[in-house]
Image (spheres, rainbow, N blue to C red):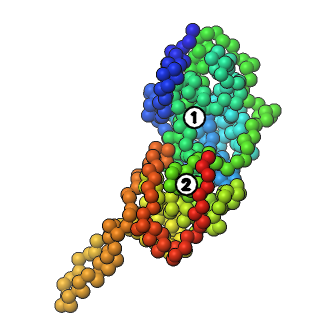
């Protein structure tokens, strides 16, 4: 007999109704999500944190894969986002928890995370459980559509929970940035918590159906398992630029928005030999500026954009007009000055304000710090004569990059 969740999903598929997104706020009950960046915070969070655990890890993947930066654990009531890259050393209590063979740590492709922990921190994680073989043993419909190994977490969540696990550009973001953004925290918490939910559902169904889960190959032995090696391809190859932008403009913007520096972006594009690869950091900054100038819907944080441009004197000189219009400096009110017999020269202090916003074709973007890139709907706009004039001013008559369009993916 098909269970209610499966039937619900089948009806949605038959009616071509898109399943809703999986979010932490949609869970019942809603788990507490704790971002942890110190050993003291971790010790307090582990005081009443019993397993089994949904488990996942994240790391900075560009320009090359770095050490694991984040360990996520969920026990249903709490989700811990443990920012190990922010700590001076790998916390001993977390190491003991991961090496405890009596408590399951559940996820998808957990052998990769386990191998990473071993190589990066000498942590020998025990009782790592892959959801795929469990699902294959318990659910007949899952067996029909999937293999016992190799099914992604997103497909597993759609099958059992009838919801879509969002997998936008945040997944390839800079997981070493401190602190993590709200978008990163939501993504990381969802990955661990949905694994716990599916594991509980499968365990309950196995118990109710008297299904023996032993010897189904779900427990990973890191001493013998061969982790799946994902191909080393350009992480943004499948991210197609919206109309009006080149792929390089959009990809540079995405990497910057996800926390990468100009040198990270330059090295990544050079490593994968992208077409019309930027020649230096100034050219990378120009790509990001071009993307934001042409697509007003792309979100950004004003302080981050200002720091990105002002951190390079040459880029600041090229883009000072753009920066003034899109990231205006806060107005500081002058303190009252005692009256003087010499009158002030009218208009002297307003010289910097002679240029008004009406002089430029500028559309206000979304500058909400917590805005997500996947939630933004790029609304391309054509380059107007006035915006072309700005670009000419910024580059002294020539663009630092070739503007040839690349084919979309």
Q: Nearer the viewer, residue 298 or 154?
A: 298
Is 385 located above or below residue 271 in the figure? below
Q: Which image quadrant for residue 136?
A: top right
Residue farthest toward the bottom in the current orientation of the protein: 342
Please rate how many residues cluster around mark 2, counting C-alpha atoms within 10 Å: few if below 14, some from 14 to 19, many from 20: many
- Can you identify the residue that label 2 sits on? 250
Q: Residue at x 75, y 40 (%)?
A: 229
Q: Which mark is residue 192?
A: 1
Residue 190 in the image: above or below residue 63: above
Instruction: Point out residue 320 in the picture as x, y percentages from the top left corner.
Output: 46, 72
Q: Is residue 41 visible?
A: no
Q: In which quarter of the view is residue 213 placed?
A: top right
In the picture, measured across the screen, residue 192 lies left or right of residue 383, that is right
Image height of 22 relative to 182, above or below = above
Q: Nearer the viewer, residue 74 or 59?
A: 59
The image position of residue 107, as x and y in percent, is 63, 31
Residue at image x 55%, y 70%?
399
Residue in the image at 52% along x and 73% along y:
395
- Could you say where residue 302 lies in the image, as x and y percent from the top left? 43, 60
Q: Are marks 1 and 2 in contact (CB under 8 Å)?
A: no
Which element type, helix, strand or loop, lies under badge 2? helix
Residue 271 visible in the current orientation? yes
Indicate the secondary structure of the residue bearing disc 1.
Answer: helix
């Amino acid at each position: 007999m098909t269970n209610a969740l499966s039937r619900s999903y089948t009806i949605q598929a038959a009616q071509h109704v898109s399943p809703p997104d999986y979010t932490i706020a949609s869970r019942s009950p809603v788990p507490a999500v704790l971002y942890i960046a110190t050993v003291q915070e971790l010790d307090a969070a582990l005081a009443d944190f019993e397993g089994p655990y949904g488990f996942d890890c994240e790391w900075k993947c560009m320009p090359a894969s770095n050490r694991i930066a984040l360990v996520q654990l969920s026990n249903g009531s709490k989700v811990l986002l443990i920012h190990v890259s922010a700590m001076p050393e790998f916390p001993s209590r977390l190491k003991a928890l991961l090496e405890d063979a009596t408590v399951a740590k559940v996820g998808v492709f957990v052998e990769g995370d386990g191998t990473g922990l071993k190589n990066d921190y000498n942590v020998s994680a025990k009782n790592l459980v892959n959801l795929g073989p469990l699902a294959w043993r318990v659910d007949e419909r899952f067996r029909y559509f999937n293999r016992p190994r190799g099914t992604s977490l997103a497909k597993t969540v759609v099958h059992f929970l009838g919801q879509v696990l969002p997998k936008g550009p945040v997944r390839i973001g800079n997981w070493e940035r401190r602190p993590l953004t709200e978008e990163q925290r939501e993504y990381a918490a969802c990955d661990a918590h949905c694994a716990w939910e599916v594991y509980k559902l499968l365990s309950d169904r196995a118990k109710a159906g008297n299904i023996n889960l032993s010897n189904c190959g779900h427990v990973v032995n890191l001493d013998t398992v061969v982790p799946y090696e994902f191909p080393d391809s350009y992480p943004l190859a499948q991210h197609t630029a919206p109309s009006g932008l080149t792929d390089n403009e959009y990809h540079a913007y995405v990497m910057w928005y996800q926390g990468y520096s100009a040198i990270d972006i330059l090295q990544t594009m050079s490593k994968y030999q992208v077409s019309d690869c930027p020649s230096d950091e100034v050219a990378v900054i120009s790509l990001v500026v071009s993307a934001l100038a042409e697509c007003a819907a792309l979100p950004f944080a004003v302080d981050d954009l200002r720091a990105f441009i002002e951190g390079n004197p040459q880029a600041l000189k090229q883009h000072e007009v753009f920066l003034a219009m899109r990231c205006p400096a806060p107005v500081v009110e002058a303190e009252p000055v005692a009256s003087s017999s010499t009158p002030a020269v009218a208009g002297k202090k307003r010289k910097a304000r002679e240029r008004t916003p009406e002089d430029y074709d500028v559309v206000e973007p979304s500058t909400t710090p917590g805005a997500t890139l996947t939630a933004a709907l790029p609304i391309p706009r054509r380059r107007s004569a006035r915006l072309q004039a700005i670009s000419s001013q910024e580059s002294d008559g020539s663009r630092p990059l070739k503007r040839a369009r690349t084919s979309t993916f």
